Image (tube, helix red, strand yellow):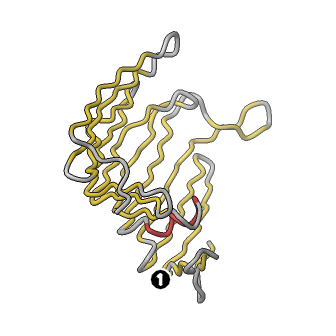
Amino acid sequence: NIRRDDGDLVLRTTPPFKAGLSEVLLQLNSSREAVRAEVRVQGSQLGELAWQAELPIALRDGNLVISNTLPARGSARINLPSIRWAGPWLGPAHDIDGTLNADLALSGIWPQLKPSGYLRGDKLSYAHLTEGLAFRDGILRARLDPGVLALETFRIQGGSGFFTASAELLLNEESPTAGLDWKAEGLHVLNLD
């Protein structure tokens, strides 16, 4: 086990981003049947990131291997109250904000694990300060099911207009297919006032 005892995570952005860490945990356990791992990071400004996995193991020809007959599982949870810290990574003129939440899972027999879960974004905004781009009040709803990645809704406002989109990607091994619907109505892309 590795735990945070003291200290913080500071990103060298302008201005510097301080995560406000309250918990950092890395845990790895093994037994004759499985390997289990857990990672958890929590901070007042960062939010919460958590990941867990359990892989069944078996002895095969004198070697430990991931079992391809017993179920494996994993999950990830993301709760970010603000993504403002990501803007400076794109460059000093980029301003991004909003909240992101995700709950994702993998389960099945190794290596054919099946994904599921959702991603949700609210109050999303993007501005490019020198180019005059300004979008606000964005929402994002996406889900992941076995064989399907669906963007159920993406909507963002520019000026008094908006852009909306939905999409679906069918993850078929032989021939993946995708569909996209979008609409822009009265959308103001540039705001040079």
Q: Which residue appears farthest toward the right when viewing the image?
A: 62
User: Height in image: 80 above or below 52?
Assistant: below
- Count of marks placed on residues: 1
The image quadrant that residue 5 belongs to is bottom right
Residue ID for mark 1: 22
Q: Which residue appears farthest toward the front when viewing the image?
A: 193
Residue 26 point in image, percent of width and height: 59, 68
User: Which amino acid lies under the numbered mark 1 shown in the image of this protein?
Assistant: Ser
Residue 192 point in image, percent of width and height: 38, 59
- Seen at 40% across and 57% down, the residue is 126
Closest to the observer, 105 or 49: 49
- Seen at 35% across and 26% down, the residue is 168
User: On the rendered image, what quadrant is the C terminus found in?
Assistant: bottom left
User: On the rendered image, what quadrant is the N terminus found in?
Assistant: bottom right
Residue 58 point in image, percent of width and height: 65, 38
User: Height in image: 2 above or below 87?
Assistant: below
- Seen at 57% across and 80% down, the residue is 16
Closest to the observer, 118 or 93: 93
Residue 27 point in image, percent of width and height: 58, 66
Q: Secondary structure at mark 1?
A: strand
- Seen at 49% across and 11% down, the residue is 175
